[in-house]
Structures are given as C-alpha cells and as structure tokens.
Image (spheres, rainbow, N blue to C red):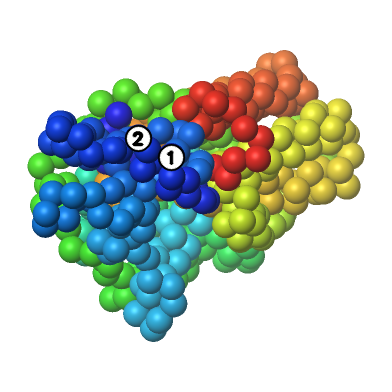
Amino acid sequence: MDTTAAPVVQLVESNQQQIQDDLTVDAHLHQDSNRLAHEEKTPHPTEAQNGVYAHVPNDDGQPDAPVDVEASNRSTGVDDFPDGGLQAWLVLTGAFLALFTSFGFMVAIGTVQEYLQLHQLSDYTSRDIGWIPSVFVYLSLAGGIWVGPVFDRYGPRWLALFGSVTYVAMMFLLAECSKYWHFLLCLGFLGGIAGATLTTTSMAVNTFPRYGYAWSIRILAFVNLGCMIISNMLMKPRLPPSPQAKKQPIISLGLFGDMKFTLFTITVFGFEIVLFGALGILPTYANYGGKFPPDTGFYIIAVMNGVSCAGRIIPGYISDFIGRFNTLMIMVVATLILMLVLWLPFGHSSLTVLYVFCALFGFGTGSWMALTPACIGQLCEAEHFGRYYGTMYFVASLATLVCVPISGELVETVGPQIMVGFMCAILGLSLVTFTLSRWACLDWNWSWTAKV
C-alpha cells in the first residue's frame, strides 16, 4: 500500500484491550516495534472501524500509553486545516474569483457552441463545432497531470500569474475570431493551455444579443481581467512546498496500483462524459426539431448552472455527517433516476419538463463537481493532493475530448432519445465502478453504515 495514502474509513471508537493483548512485550521487542510501525501506516480495516491505536515505547524500551494514530497525524499540522480567520477567507475569495473566470464558462460551454453554430460557423455540423470546446476542456483538465505536481513543488504564485495572463490574452483574441481554425486555435488550444475560458452563462445571455459577439467577448475579458488581478493578489499557499514533493515524478501513473484510486478514476471518466456531454449538447438538443423557442438553449444552461450552486453547497455540508463517498453515491443514484424518469421520455417533447430536469440535473452534477475533489482528498495526504488530482484528471479528461462530438453526432443522426439513453448507460456503468471503489475503501468488507 502507498505510504502516502490516508485511511478512508473514519476512526470512530477504540478497542484498547485487544491491541494490548496483541502487542505483549517479549524477547523479540525489536521485531514487534517494527511490526507496529508498519501497522500504523497501513491499519487493518477492522481496526480502522474500531479505532487504531499503537503503543509507543518510552525511554526505558517499554510500551507506554496508547496513541491515537489519527490524532498523531493531525498534530503534525499537515492535514490540520484552519477553520475561518481573515487570511483564510481572503484566500477563499481569491480562489472563488479565479474559478469564476476560469471554470465558470467551462460548465456553460454549450452557449458559445450554440451561438457559433447559428452565426460564424453555421456551415459546420454540431460534431465539427463540438471539437472546439472538447479540445479546450480536455487540455484544461488533462494539463493537471503537470500542473498538479508543479503546484506541489513550487506553490500557486507563478502558476496563477501565467494562467491569468494567458487567459486574458485568449479572451481578447477570441473577440477577433471569425473562422473555424481561429476558434480551434484560440479557444481550443490557447484557452485549454490557460486552463480557463469565458465566464458565467448569465452574462453571455445578456451580452450576446445586446452588444454582439465581439464586444460581448471584450466585456467578459475586462471583467475577467479585474477578477484575475484580485485573485492573484489574494491567493497564497497554506503550507510551504514540500521537499518530498519535489522528488516525486511529474507523471505519477504508479498511483493506479491503488485499486480504489483506479476505480474512482474510471468513475470520474464517466462523470465527465455525462456532465460535459450534456453541457455541450443541451442547447443543440433544445433547438432540435424547432419545437422550442430559439433562445431555450441559453436559458436552460443558465438554470442548470444557477441551481448547480446549491448542489455544490448542500450535499457537501451533508457529507460531513454521513461521509463523502456515501453522499456522492446518493447523488449519482438520484441523478440517474432523474435522467431515466424525466429526460429520456419527456425532455424532447415538453419544455416544462426540460426546464425542471435541467434544474434538478444541475443540482446533481453540481454535487459531483464539489464532492469529487473531496473524495480524492480522502485517498491521499494534503501535500500530495495536486499529484493525485492531476493524475486522475489526466485520464478522466480524455472523456471531454470526445463526449461533445459524439453527443452532437447522436442527436443529428439517430435522434435525441438515443443520445440520452447513451448518457444513462454511461452513468449506470459509472455507478457500478464507484460502488466498487467504495468497497475497495472498506478493504472489500462491504458495510452500508460505514462512514466513507
């Protein structure tokens, strides 16, 4: 087992007498001490549920009072996160502004795709146009396999500055684009390298019709420039870069030797297909067949992302009480049922049902985006989070490269219901692998009540 991996099952109570019986001091005290050191790093799942304690020898070579391993880890300060305080809230504000400008439009990429399909790129198919946002999202997420370890080694300062400058440059260049290859190079590749794109859907809906494409993009660029300046001033690391992290390889494919991490990566791969496939194709889906008003595609994305904010807050709060993996599993099951009951049979025929579905779907997928990093954090220590996160999304981001073109092709060739059925099947498979990942976290001893 990787020594950097932290237990994912919460320690709830102790069983000190059993441990004392197992650790009786005999003539081979040195061998017992080595065995105890190994057990502290890789606790048995039964002990993890009942409380893991170890006897630490004192100066006389005799075992002293039992020590809570989890409490000992917290005392080092590595995973002892501060709660509140002015500096913490300032850093949080800076991170919020960076995500507002970078990730905000990533989850609303369908609005730009639909606008381009109706205007500058009206001669191209949905599949062809879909490659533009697909390349952008893929590079933004896949770049984490290099950005994550660099963050662990050197901190956020220069990474944030580089991303901000590149992002703002991409925004102003995007306003001048008019041909397919312009958009692919600027939004797809340059935007992907910057790890960011435009902004929230609500601003796109208001500015595109009122000011036209070029000035809408310029307005968003100036707004994002202001946000990025403030963000770079406020963000700073809580801990200095770890010397050990600088010795770790940039590409850490060896992490996939951990079965729970591998299964969770496969799960997130499916999440990305459903989430970004839906975000990219919903505007085209709404305009398919001309049954709904032309601006429906813009508004359903706005509704979806608006409700998504609640989905990122409420389930996260609940997860503190019942566990991150448990909460995420509940939300995946609920979202799958929602897709089967509302989207599949009625989404293409009833405008009311489509709005209701998009609102509830936004709540469900919002919880995925909020809880996925939290679940990754339970599989590793804080100083290795960037490496784990970047490695996972290097693989999972491959889904974003193909999901939008595939979804567009399905809508245009076989109809919207087949596309929705494809999404439901992918999410169903993701639920299976996620269940296996949770089972692996319990060391293959399934328990419905374990807080994972």
Residue ranking furthest to the front: 27
Percent of width and height locating residue 343: 79, 34
* Relative to 72, residue 47 above or below: above
Q: Nearer the viewer, residue 348 or 70?
A: 70
Residue 246 is at least partly visible in this image? yes
Q: How many marks?
A: 2
* Residue 333 left/right relative to 184: right
Element under label 2? helix
Can you identify the residue that label 1 sits on?
A: 18
Q: Residues within 10 Å of mark 2 (few under 14, many from 20)?
A: few
Q: Distance between the residues labelled 1 and 2?
A: 6 Å
Percent of width and height locating residue 97: 43, 68
Q: Nearer the viewer, residue 286 or 420?
A: 420
Please say if the residues under marks 1 and 2 sit with CB atoms less than 8 Å apart: yes
| Residue at 30% over, 29% down | 1
Residue 190 is at least partly visible in this image? no
Percent of width and height locating residue 243: 11, 52
Residue 53, numbered label = none
| Residue at 65% over, 40% down | 449
| Residue at 31% over, 46% down | 54
Residue 22, numbered label = 2
